[in-house]
């Protein structure tokens, strides 16, 4: 039976290492997870002496990192190992190799393992307590020494985080490849025709005052302004309603979000206007 060994009260690095092996190393998806005191090995055996047993974040083996002062962690070492194994098998599908989302996820794990979150902007913000570190700490208080439960939940959390990282990388690529930058009376705008809704969030994080996304499959449109901006989309709403009265347009109470069509409302009717026609309305809008 393939076995992955890590330490009691597993942290983000330990669980991320288990996740990488189970999700990306062929034949290890059903591996059993066992726990030992930090630094120890299973049954006090010599670390890495059994190819059916991996020790991660414990045991001082090749998938541990506590024997060195390098800027690394167990998850980084596991990812390096998986990629090395992929390079040996030319016929195998390289799942982890060249995966930017995976690189970025593991870099965050490394920063967490070196406590660099204390250097984040406004580190006392409650917002960070919605993150994985806080979630793990909460689970330890709830589940005590039920480490299997913590690992199982952690694997699901990492599945979601990884999928979101993939979406984020894709959105950044979409913006770079086909994003249309334009000027408004309120500031810079960004428009993109894509099925990836993450483009809106990424555009706002890139400090665009206004971001427009049109879904090329459903023809739905989302127009969002930065929350602290002086944008008022009321006049745009009125013009768009006049240009396309059959479409379902919704102006948010904040006047900073204008929507056409939504999966939340399957009865809504998408607009017939093109993305450029919508951008023209925004470009010519007055305060």
Image (tube, helix red, strand yellow):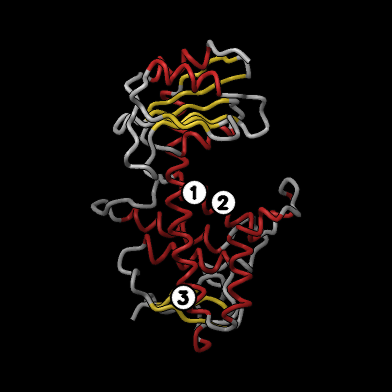
Contact between marks 2 and 1 (CB within 8 A): the answer is yes
Of the two numbered discs 3 and 2 in the rendering, the one whose residue sits closer to the viewer: 2
Say which residue label 2 marks: 107
Marks 3 and 2 sit apart, C-alpha to C-alpha, by 25 Å
Q: Label 2 vs label 1: CA separation?
A: 6 Å
Quadrant of the image containing the N terminus: bottom left
Which of the two discs, 3 and 2, labels the residue nearer the N terminus?
A: 3
Question: Does residue 153 sit above or below 118 in this rendering?
Answer: below
In the rendered view, would you say 7 is above or below 99?
Answer: below
Q: Secondary structure at mark 2?
A: helix
Q: Which residue is mark 1?
A: 103
In this view, the residue in front, 73 or 170, is 170
Q: Are marks 1 and 3 in contact (CB under 8 Å)?
A: no
Nearest to the eye among marks 1 and 3: give it. 1
Determine crowd level at label 1: few under 14, some 14-19, many 20+ residues with C-alpha closer than 10 A. Answer: some
Secondary structure beneath disc 3? loop
At 38% from the left edge and 34% from the top edge, which residue is drawn? 261
Residue that appears at 57% across and 84% down: 145
Instruction: Check residue 212 in the rendering and tell me which mark sits there, or answer none.
Output: none
Q: Position of residue 277 (x, y in %)?
A: 40, 14
| Mark drawn on residue 48 | 3
Foreground residue among 239 and 64: 239
Q: Give the mark nearer the N terminus: 1 vs 3.
A: 3
């Amino acid at each position: 039976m393939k076995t992955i060994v890590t330490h009691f009260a597993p942290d983000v690095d330990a669980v991320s290492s288990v996740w990488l092996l189970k999700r990306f190393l062929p034949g290890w998806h059903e591996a059993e997870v066992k726990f030992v005191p930090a630094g120890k090995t299973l049954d006090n055996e010599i670390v890495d002496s059994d190819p059916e047993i991996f020790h991660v974040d414990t045991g001082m083996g090749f998938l541990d990192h506590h024997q060195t002062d390098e800027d690394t962690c167990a998850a980084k070492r596991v990812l390096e190992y998986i990629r090395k194994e992929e390079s040996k098998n030319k016929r195998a599908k390289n799942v982890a190799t060249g995966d930017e989302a995976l690189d970025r996820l593991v870099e965050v794990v490394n920063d967490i393992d070196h406590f660099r979150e204390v250097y984040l902007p406004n580190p006392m913000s409650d917002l960070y307590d919605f993150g994985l570190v806080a979630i793990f700490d909460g689970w330890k208080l709830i589940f005590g020494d039920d480490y299997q439960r913590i690992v199982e939940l952690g694997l699901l959390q990492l599945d979601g985080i990884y999928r979101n990282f993939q979406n984020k990388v894709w959105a950044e690529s979409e913006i770079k490849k086909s994003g249309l930058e334009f000027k408004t009376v309120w500031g810079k705008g960004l428009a993109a025709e894509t099925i990836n809704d993450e483009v809106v969030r990424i555009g706002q994080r890139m400090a665009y005052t206004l971001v427009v996304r049109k879904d090329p499959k459903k023809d739905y449109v989302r127009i969002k302004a930065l929350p602290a901006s002086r944008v008022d989309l009321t006049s745009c709403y009125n013009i768009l309603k006049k240009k396309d009265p059959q479409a379902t347009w919704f102006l948010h109470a904040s006047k900073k979000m204008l929507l056409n069509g939504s999966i939340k409302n399957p009865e809504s009717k998408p607009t017939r206007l093109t993305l450029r026609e919508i951008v023209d309305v925004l470009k010519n809008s007055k305060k």
